[in-house]
Every structure is written in structure tokens, then in C-alpha cells.
Amino acid sequence: MSAKLLSIGACQRTTITRLTTSRQCDIIITRSTADRAPRSPANVNLRSPSFMQSFDASQRPYSSALPIETIKESIKSSVLEEAAKKNSPFWDEKPTPKKAPSFNGINGHHLHHGKGQTVDIEQRLSDVVDVDSPINKHDSLDEWFLDAVSSNRHHAEGALNGLSAGEISPRIPEGVAPLDHQINDPFHLSRPDVHDISATIGRDLVGTDHPVLNSAARYFFNGEDGKGKGKQVRPVMVMLLSRSMIHIDHEPETSSPRVTHILKSQRRLAEITEMIHTASLFHDDVIDDADTRRGQPAAHRAFGNKMAILAGDYLLARASICLARLRNVDVVECMSTVIEHLVRGEVLQIKDNRTGVADMEGYLRKNFYKTASLMANSCKSAALLRGNVSPEVVEAAYRYGKHVGVAFQLIDDALDFEGSAASLGKPALADLNAGLSTAPVLFAAESHGQELIPAMARKFNEHGDVELALRCINEADGVERTKKLAAIHAEQAMDAVVRALEPSPYRDSLVHLACRVVDRSR
């Protein structure tokens, strides 16, 4: 139960109490004493047909006291508040009611398999799996390591494991060979697998008969000058991890048709990952009203909002078809979870945009949903497609992607304060000027909250707010602490793969990729 007090006019006060159950949402409206004598509140169920029939537009008790837009705004705020909670039942998977026994098979018929044999498909599936139970383990999202970069420990010598004085660089685990461009450089090793991924997606996977939708869907995949492709970190991660797992059972890489088939499936997974990521960019840029992306006009600037949204939806649809064709139900569930997480992350961002203030843990959770979940579940799916690997390897793949993803977004936050428009592919201070409170701002708010939080709440839209934020961030070492937290997460990713995978140039390249995510300048 939640209540919000709204003042309507100078002499009128209306209290709205929202009672939410699984079946109804009742609103109790109490009129002020300014226009009637006191009496007991009237319970009004706005969804009741009898209520709607009892009053015409001029008789409804809420028509003058409570504008419909106010009701909509109140409901929207309540839904966002509930959906943004960490353990909100809003996202719970609710089991579907069990159906009464009926006909077997599909559409009430038995399916025949071979001569004289009948296969009861419904019974076989129910014997194998409970369709109401998730396959993949839930991540509690409580490993953020914020204590390591707290203001109390920030200036303590040697407080951060693996970080030398004056430098923000992750520690390389023992047993990993030094970076060598010809041997274990992640982008050099993955080039044969990923160099033409954008071209393959644009040519083979997203074709449509509609010319404008076709051009929009291929917008980030067909750049002849290299613009629009992005860094392709996600496909690189998937393919490096895929090849590093070949060595688990010491099977020669090119001698087995099975290995060839697995690598082909994992390559398709890398393409699916890039398609989902690109679809999210189409939608994000419309929501954020961005001007540029990857050094060129954002898709909605080139094609309009409606076509950009449709292009993003189309990419998700094509990715779903390709995903189903992998014929691996574990992978289908794993990657489908990513799409739910993208929505959850956007809901959290919308809530933060409305209030202007977020807590650090909530911010990192939002970043997981919007960025790290795709990396984590793509890496996990690569391990699932490999098959014949231990649960420890699957978990290590997930942890690698998760922590690299968290580090990746934190460095993005830091670069927004340090980079230039040319290096970032978007204007510098874009997040701050858009009213977004990213990690450096949230770190600064811990010690400068009295003056910074009001500016955050109004989204830095008053004169001097941006300058105030920059001063507070500088005094609180907000950018440096953001980089240090990124380095800690990169170390977690490195440790995960080093402990779980056999030594190889591909395993070592994963370590150097995590390091490069932190050390990058764009």
C-alpha cells in the first residue's frame, strides 16, 4: 500500500491511496471540506463497469478534482517505483496454471514415429523438463566490491589489490604469458573469426523486402569506411572463449567435424550477440534523444524515431530466429534473459531520470542489466554450446563476461569526463549534459552530497550545475575511483578464466582483453 498527497488548486486537497492486489487496483478519493460537508470516504473502483455506468462525464466525482493525467502520472510513478526495487515481485516468473489432462500430442493428436510407433510428445516433454522452472541459476547481483574503493580506503597505501601506486591497471595473474601481438593479442587472435561478422550480419541475417527498414537495420553493419562497426568486444569475447575451451579435452582443433560444428554454432552466437547489442543501441538512442553513435548520426537522426524503433525490433526478431536454430534450449533461455534484462535496465534508468538521484549499488545493478548481462550470458552460452564442460567452466565463463561488462561500463563513465568527441564517437561530458548521474558523480556525492544531490535531482539543468559537479568530482577523485573499481572487476574476470581453463594463447588473450578494457581510451 502506498499513498501520495496531491494538492489541486488553492482550497482543494485530494488523497489517493493505491491498494494493489493480484486482481484489482482501487482508488479511494476523499473530497475536501471546501465543497461539501464531512462524510466517510467513498471507495471507488475505477475498473468497475458498474462505476463507469453509474455516472456520466459531468457526474463522476473525480472529474473536476483529479485530472486523468494526474492519475496516469501517479500510476506510472508507482509502477516504476515497484519495478525498480531489487527484489520486486514485478519480475517474478509466475507458474502457469496446470491444465486438466486432455488429448495427447499436438492439437489433440498422436504423432507417429516410424512404422507402427506412436510418440506422445506432450508426455515426453513433461517427463524431461518442468516448463515453469528456469534452467539457469539466479544471480543475486551483490558482488560490487564497493568497500575496496570507499572514501576511507581510497587513499590508503596498498588498499587495492593489484594496483600499483599512481597507476590504475589490473594485476595479471601468475602463469599468464606477457602480451605478444603475434601470440596472444585478443584482437589479432580473434580476427579470423570476427573480422567479417558485421558484413555477414548485414548480408545474410537481416535482409528484408522493405527498402527503408532494410537500410535502417543494416545501418551499423555495412559501413565501408569502418564507421558504425564499433569495437566488437562482445563477438571477440565469445570467439576467444570458444576457442580456449577446445583445449579442455585436448581435442585437436581442426581434426574433428564435431569441433567444426561447435565453432560454427559459437560463431553464430557471436553474431546474435552483436545483433542484440545493436538493437539496444537503436532503442537507447531514441529514448536518450542522442545525436551521434559510433562517429556518425544516430539511427533515428537518419531514419526517424519510428523506423529506428522498428529496426531495433526487427534485429531482435531476427536474432531470436537465429537463436532458436541453435537447437539448444539452455542457450535459448540464457540469451532470452538478456532481452528481459535490457528492459529492466531501461526501467531503472527511466526511474533515475525522473528523480535524478541513484544509489551506487542500484546504479551498478542497472549497468549489469543494460551492459554486463549480454556479455555474461553470451560467454555462458558459448560454454553451453561447447558441451562436455564442467559446471565450474560454465560459471567461470559467466563470471568473466559479467565482470568485464561491469568494468567496461565503468570505464565508459570515466572516459565521458576525460575523452574528446573524436575519441569517444560522441560529445565529451555527454552524460553530464544529459542530466545523467554516472559513477564519478555518485562517488562524489558520498562526500559532497549536500551541494551535489540537489543538482543531481534537477539533472544539472541550472546555470553552474555542470561546473559544480566537475569540481565535486575532482575533489572526491570520482573518476579515479571509478577506474579503480573497473580494475577490480577486471581482475575478477581474469581470475575466473585462469582458474577454470587450461593454459593456452586463447586463455591468455582473454586476460589481456580484460586488461585492455580498463586501459582503453575510447
Image: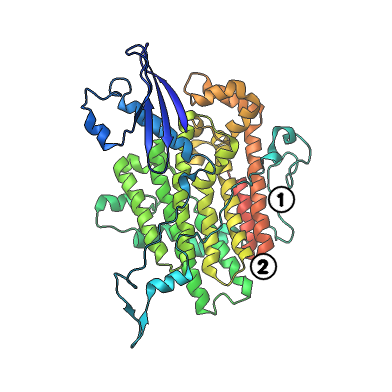
Which residue corresponds to mark 1?
171
Q: Position of residue 416 (x, y in %)?
A: 54, 36
Residue 512 picture location, percent across and down: 63, 55
Q: CA distance from mark 1 to mark 2?
A: 19 Å
Q: Residues within 10 Å of mark 2 (few under 14, many from 20)?
A: some
Give 56 or 444, whichever is nearer the viewer. 56
Q: As shown in the figure, which amino acid type bears the numbered disc 1?
A: Arg
Horizontally, is 254 left or right of 61 in the view?
Answer: right
**Is label 1 in a helix, a strand or a loop?**
loop
Earlier sequence position, callout 1 versus callout 2: 1
**Residue positioned 67% across, 43% down in the render:** 145
Pinpoint residue 79: horizontal percent, then vertical percent: 43, 37
Work out which quarter of the rendered image holds the C terminus and state it.
top right
Point 73% across, 44% down: residue: 163
Q: Is residue 154 left or right of residue 128?
A: right
- Residue under label 2, please give it: 502
Residue 489 x/y as whole percent: 64, 48
Toward the front, the furthest residue is 39
